[in-house]
Image (tube, rainbow, N blue to C red):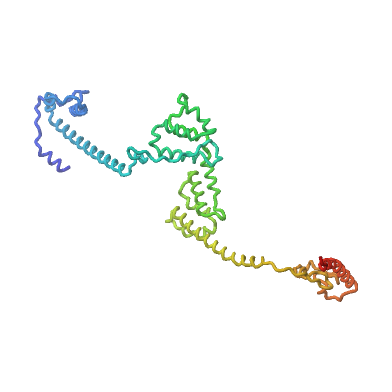
């Protein structure tokens, strides 16, 4: 600025005659010379300044000089903006050519149509076939986006979407499919909104938040299965991602929490990294448990196989004086269930009775022996008979 000021001081001042002093004062309401020049420049087909108008401008050289300088500066600014805009257009064009996309949708080569995607299932308003409205809508939107060249207009999109609706749902939207209807669909989004009102879940976010609150890792459930449900509820419930790492750790099984505690307490580890550590450690824990189960199962299987062998049956021997088979006597019995026939006290049998046998005891034993002999004699006679 100092140089400019010095330069201006050395420039000779123009002497303006007194007869031109009146012309320097512009009447009120009359446009200035600069405004006149700009207006004429904006008019592409308008006339250029005449010699007489130019001579009129020369009567005030200082004002004309300032106007010319200002016009030059504006022209430079316009040129800079033009060059910048041209560079941006060239860069955008090159980017579009490299990616081959227009508006975010892959543009098919000229003369070729996009590959036809499979049609989504028919939606009839029910969920008996596992087709919910949200899943169906995603498939329809993907179809229209992937085959955008086949459905370039809103009418074609409406016709296609209506063709993928059946049953009660088609009955409800049919009146608005007629072009003569006052409430006819004008865009496919209006059709989506109508179906959303009919079959959308207004409490979807609230239900997802409640399910997320109640979610815990169940016994026998892998971490990947649990984490899929975790992310599903986070998305549907529109849950803030700020505290998801804490929420995930609180919902893990206690055994997995102990193993991944060091990763949870590290603030540098993000949610996705923490989830990968959980997946790795969960798989290692399950592998060790399966190996331990196989190791303990082998001796049990061997004992079962050995215990399952059958031995030839041996006739049971009857002990004289007791009339009880040996096989029956080998079976363990609690001492409280035993009763002595000699002293009639519980806890032992006649053979182990510490008291001497009485006459009454001998009679009882003889009667039982006779009863057993009478019961076994017919069987022995039938075995000795020759056919």
Q: Residue at x 90, y 73 (%)?
A: 359
Quadrant, the N terminus:
top left
Judged left or right of residue 179, residue 215 is right
What percent of the width, then of the height, locates residue 218? 56, 53
Judged left or right of residue 371, residue 203 is left
What percent of the width, then of the height, locates residue 378? 85, 66
Q: Is residue 243 above or below residue 12?
A: below
Q: In the depicted view, which residue is nearer to us: 250 or 377? A: 377
What percent of the width, then of the height, locates residue 190? 45, 32
Q: Is residue 303 above or below residue 22?
A: below
Q: In the depicted view, which residue is nearer to us: 42 or 312? A: 312
Q: In the depicted view, which residue is nearer to us: 144 or 94? A: 144
**Total marks drawn?**
0
Q: Residue at x 55, y 61 (%)?
A: 290
State the image quarter where residue 377 is shown.
bottom right
Judged left or right of residue 176, residue 102 is left
State the image quarter where residue 37 is shown.
top left
Q: In the depicted view, which residue is nearer to us: 347 or 327? A: 327
Query: Which residue sits furthest front?
Result: 387
């Amino acid at each position: 600025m100092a140089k400019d000021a010095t330069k201006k001081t050395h420039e000779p001042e123009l002497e303006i005659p007194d007869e031109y002093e009146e012309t320097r004062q512009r009447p009120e309401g009359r446009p200035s010379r600069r405004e006149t020049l700009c207006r004429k420049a904006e008019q592409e087909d308008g006339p250029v300044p005449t010699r007489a108008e130019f001579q009129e401008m020369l009567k005030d050289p200082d004002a004309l000089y300032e106007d010319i300088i200002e016009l030059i500066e504006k022209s430079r600014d316009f040129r800079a903006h033009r060059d910048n805009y041209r560079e941006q257009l060239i860069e955008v064009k090159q980017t579009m050519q490299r990616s081959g996309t227009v508006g975010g949708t892959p543009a098919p080569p000229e003369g070729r149509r996009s590959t036809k995607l499979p049609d989504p299932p028919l939606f009839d308003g029910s969920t008996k076939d596992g087709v919910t409205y949200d899943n169906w809508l995603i498939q329809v939107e993907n179809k229209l986006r992937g085959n955008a060249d086949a459905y370039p207009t809103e009418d074609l999109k409406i016709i296609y979407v209506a063709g993928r609706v059946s049953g009660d749902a088609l009955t409800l939207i049919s009146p608005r499919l007629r072009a003569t209807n006052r409430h006819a669909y004008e865009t496919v989004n209006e059709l989506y909104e109508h179906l959303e009102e009919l079959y959308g879940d207004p409490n979807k976010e609230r239900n997802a938040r409640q399910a997320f609150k109640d979610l815990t890792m169940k016994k026998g459930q892998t971490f990947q299965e649990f984490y899929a449900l975790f992310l599903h509820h986070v998305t549907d419930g529109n849950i803030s991602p700020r505290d998801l790492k804490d929420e995930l750790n609180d919902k893990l099984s206690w055994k997995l929490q102990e193993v991944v505690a060091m990763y949870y307490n590290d603030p540098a580890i993000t949610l996705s990294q923490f989830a990968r550590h959980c997946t790795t450690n969960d798989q290692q824990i399950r592998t060790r448990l399966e190996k331990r189960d196989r190791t303990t199962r082998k001796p049990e299987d061997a004992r079962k196989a050995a215990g399952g062998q059958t031995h030839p049956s041996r006739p049971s021997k009857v002990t004289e004086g007791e009339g009880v088979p040996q096989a029956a006597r080998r079976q363990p019995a609690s001492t409280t269930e035993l009763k002595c026939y000699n002293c009639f006290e519980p806890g032992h049998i006649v053979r182990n009775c510490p008291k001497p046998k009485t006459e009454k005891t001998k009679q009882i034993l003889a009667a039982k022996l006779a009863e057993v002999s009478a019961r076994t004699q017919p069987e022995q006679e039938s075995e000795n008979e020759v056919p």
